[in-house]
Image: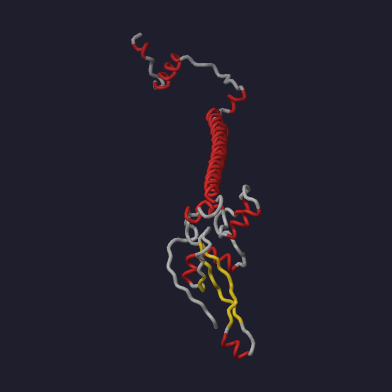
């Protein structure tokens, strides 16, 4: 089977500004031995990768795909395996940039540009030979900066709205707690002021005759008379009283 192997070292990744990009594809390669045995051309699809930088039309080496390529460009390789051609693995697609006409988009795509970020990050060396590219690069930078600022403002507004909502919820909870506390205070105060239910129900705690308005018919004995009666009770029968002994 015919194979072509290239070796090359490079630095950077597909997300770094001005770095090398990767385009994975399948290329049919004839298997010479299998073709000779079958007496007809036999081909096998081989994974290949084209390395390039946007704006550089002259340096686009092609390699057989290795694990190093898969690890260095995981998003591009995943899009390739999913069957997505010319996928924009990061950034804003050129078709979403309203200032570009369709023909201009196709022209830039033919030069290896896939996103607005590619236009912004193209090196001056590669942008200079392309008509109007330097100006387009500056406009891409301004457009992306403005979009980032708007996104930041929207995020701040969203965070403020969330914070205000949480504050309102906390205020409502505090009001509900205050209402419950006030209600409990009134209930406790009412319980303290009420008659003890035990005193009203235990037998003997209240005089039923007094409760019915009963009055004792017996006369009230003066204190002095009570003392005399007490003395008479102590004297033995037949013995004269003290005031009578001297008489």
Corner quadrant of residue 176:
top right
* Residue 13 on image: x %, y %: 47, 61
Q: Position of residue 236 (x, y in %)?
A: 39, 22
Q: Can you give x and y, in whole percent of width and height, for residue 48 in the image?
A: 54, 72
Task: Please indicate, yes or no, whether residue 198 appears anywhere in the rendered image.
Answer: no
How far from the left and from the top, in percent, is residue 192? 52, 30
Who's the residue at 49% across and 69% down the image?
Answer: 69
Name the image quarter holding the N terminus. bottom right
Viewer-closest of 136 and 220: 136
In which quadrant of the rendered view does residue 84 lie? bottom right
Identify whether 201 is placed above or below 209: below
Report the number of discs. Answer: 0
Q: Residue at the location (58% across, 19% down)?
A: 217
Above-or-below relation of 15 to 78: above
Farthest residue toward the top?
A: 247
Please indicate, yes or no, whether residue 15 appears anywhere in the rendered image.
yes
Which colour style is shown?
secondary structure
Is residue 206 shown above or below 89? above
Residue pushed farthest right?
Answer: 102
Q: Quadrant of the C terminus?
A: top left
């Amino acid at each position: 089977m015919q194979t072509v192997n290239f070796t090359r070292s490079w630095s950077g990744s597909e997300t770094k500004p001005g770095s090398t990009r990767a385009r994975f594809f399948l290329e049919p390669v004839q298997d010479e031995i299998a073709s000779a045995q079958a007496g007809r051309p036999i081909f096998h699809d081989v994974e290949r990768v084209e390395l390039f930088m946007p704006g550089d039309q002259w340096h686009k080496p092609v390699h057989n795909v290795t694990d190093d390529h898969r690890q260095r460009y995981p998003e591009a390789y995943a899009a390739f395996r999913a069957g997505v051609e010319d996928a924009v693995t990061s950034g804003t697609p050129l078709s979403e940039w309203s200032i570009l006409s369709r023909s201009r988009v196709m022209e830039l795509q033919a030069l290896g540009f896939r996103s607005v970020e590619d236009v912004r990050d193209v090196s001056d060396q590669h942008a200079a030979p392309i008509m109007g590219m330097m100006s387009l690069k500056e406009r891409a930078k301004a457009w992306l900066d403005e979009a980032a600022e708007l996104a930041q403002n929207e995020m701040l507004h969203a965070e403020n709205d969330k914070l205000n909502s949480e504050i309102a919820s906390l205020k409502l909870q505090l009001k509900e707690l205050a209402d419950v506390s006030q209600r409990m205070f009134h209930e406790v105060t009412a319980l303290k002021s009420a008659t003890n239910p035990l005193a009203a129900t235990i037998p003997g705690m209240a005089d039923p005759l007094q409760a019915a308005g009963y009055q004792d018919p017996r006369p009230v004995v003066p204190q002095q008379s009570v003392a005399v009666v007490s003395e008479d009770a102590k004297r033995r029968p037949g013995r004269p009283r003290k005031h009578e002994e001297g008489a």
